[in-house]
């Protein structure tokens, strides 16, 4: 029952976990467990529990937004949707999400595999680290989770049941609708930016009707296009990495929405890492190598995603959309292939637009990212941020003018000076 909810700080968490035989077996004697709260996200508590024979990560939702406090209540049910999404993603993209060990809906608590020595990818990018396996892993994750939860792979009934299972996660969607698609473009109490350097740019966003139309079209698409089960918050803070492994975490914003929102999130966060790089202390050669890797990764993420998605469609389509019986014979196959290319091109345009929205919110909205925030000199930070915003405005207002991801990377490259 919902009434059973209580926040489990160290002692209570130890007692609770000690009552779970499987976890006791995994971790050893509870008296020796070391419990540390490590959550640095905006919403939840995260504990690492280490025992004599192993460790686990425990995530517990708070009944409010951690970043703001009790004045901003938030439903605990997000933990339920996160668990549901992680379970589905584990089936569709095995090995790319943490293993689930225990879940309690009443406590809004999930126990997961401890990812060690993985670090949050955003921290690695700020340090200038390259991740050679990232493109393959993240594109497998996105292509498989998006394709197999879409009408291209599911029957109409399965798809509608999927939508219904996540429909209750609307409070989390509302955060996105407000913080990403609305607030940065109006006066909002929680907005912030690198003042006074970006005051003029912030004012220009509030006065830019072409931008307001473009972001409102994206907002409508986000609200009214249940194409597939999205992660819903797929930035580089929701990805943990080592040199050779990638794990996607934190899908508490999961719901059925437009695919380009997830793909755009990855692209946007790579572009922000690129623009932020100039503000971080690193040797010239190291900086050049990192920035060229990031831009190549932007291109490879889209190209590999599109290739894998199309391959799945060509070989694994059993959904109710595009009935096989309508595309029989050579003529049908050829026409369907043209249609697949058109579908992916529309998805690319969505991706470009959503990437722009994801960028602008991190520079003018409530929730910023350390890529920019850790640039201490506000003047330097503002220069990096302004470059990102300049590209983002073009990507949002003229999304369809970018025909290829190479054009996006090329536009980013032109905005950087050496
Ligand atoms: C109030 S929550 C702010 C942001 O944190 C999450 O990670 C999402 O990105 C959300 O928009
Ligand atoms: Mg998160």
Image (cartoon, helix red, strand yellow):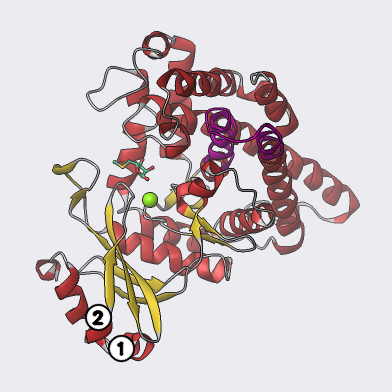
Residue most toward the left?
3
| Ligand 1 lies in quarter | top left
In the rendered structure, are the residues bearing label 2 and label 1 in contact, judged by CB atoms less than 8 Å apart? yes
In this rendering, position of residue 127 left or right of residue 135? left
Residue most toward the front?
283
Q: Is residue 318 above or below residue 41?
A: below
Range shown magenta:
265-292
How many angstroms separate mark 2 from mark 1 (CA)?
A: 7 Å
Q: How many marks?
A: 2
Instruction: State which tag comes first along the sequence, 2 or 1.
Output: 2
Label 2 CB-ligand 2 distance < 8 A: no
Q: Is residue 126 visible?
A: yes
Q: Circle 2 is placed at which residue position?
A: 17
Query: Which residue is at a point 36% across and 85% down the rendered structure image?
Result: 52
Label 1 CB-ligand 2 distance < 8 A: no
Q: Is residue 333 above or below residue 165?
A: above
Query: Which residue is at a point 33% across and 89% down the rendered structure image?
Result: 28
Q: Is residue 212 above or below residue 240?
A: above
* Quarter in which the N terminus is drawn: bottom left
Q: Position of residue 300 (x, y in %)?
A: 72, 44
Q: Circle 1 is placed at which residue position?
A: 24
């Amino acid at each position: 029952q919902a009434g059973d909810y209580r926040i489990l700080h160290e002692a209570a968490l130890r007692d609770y976990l000690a009552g779970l035989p499987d976890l006791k077996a995994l971790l050893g004697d509870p008296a020796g467990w070391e419990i540390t709260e490590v959550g640095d996200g905006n919403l939840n508590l995260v504990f690492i529990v280490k025992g004599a024979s192993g460790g686990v990560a425990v995530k517990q939702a708070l009944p409010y937004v951690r970043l703001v406090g009790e004045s901003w209540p938030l439903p605990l049910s997000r933990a339920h949707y996160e668990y549901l999404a992680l379970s589905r993603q584990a089936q569709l993209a095995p090995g790319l999400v943490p293993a689930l060990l225990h879940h309690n809906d009443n406590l809004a608590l999930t126990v997961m595999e401890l990812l060690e020595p993985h670090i949050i990818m955003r921290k690695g990018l700020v340090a200038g680290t390259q991740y050679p396996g990232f493109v393959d892993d993240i594109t497998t994750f996105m292509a498989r989770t998006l394709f197999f939860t879409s009408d291209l792979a599911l029957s109409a009934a399965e798809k509608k049941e999927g939508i219904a299972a996540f429909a209750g996660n609307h409070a989390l969607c509302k955060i996105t609708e407000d913080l990403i698609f609305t607030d940065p473009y109006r006066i909002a109490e929680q907005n912030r930016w690198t003042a006074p350097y970006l005051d003029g740019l912030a004012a220009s966003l509030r006065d830019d009707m072409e931008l307001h139309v473009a972001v409102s079209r994206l907002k409508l698409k986000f609200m009214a296009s249940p194409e597939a089960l999205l992660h819903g918050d797929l930035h580089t803070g929701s990805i943990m990495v080592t040199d050779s492994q990638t794990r996607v975490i934190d899908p508490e914003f999961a719901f059925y929405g437009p695919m380009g929102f997830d793909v755009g999130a990855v692209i946007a966060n790579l572009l922000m890492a690129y623009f932020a790089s100039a503000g971080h202390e690193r040797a010239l050669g190291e900086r050049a190598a990192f920035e060229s890797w990031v831009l190549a990764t932007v291109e490879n993420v889209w190209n590999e995603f599109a290739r894998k998605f199309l391959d799945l469609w060509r070989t694994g389509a059993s959904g109710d959309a595009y009935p096989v019986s309508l595309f029989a014979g050579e003529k049908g196959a050829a026409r369907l292939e043209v249609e697949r290319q058109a579908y992916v091109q529309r998805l690319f345009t969505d991706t470009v637009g959503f990437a722009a929205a994801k960028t602008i919110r991190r520079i003018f909205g409530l929730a910023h990212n350390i890529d920019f925030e850790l640039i201490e000199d506000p003047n330097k930070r503002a220069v990096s941020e302004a470059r990102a915003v300049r590209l983002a405005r073009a990507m949002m207002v003229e999304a369809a003018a970018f025909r290829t991801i190479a054009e996006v990377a090329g536009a980013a490259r032109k905005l950087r000076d050496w």
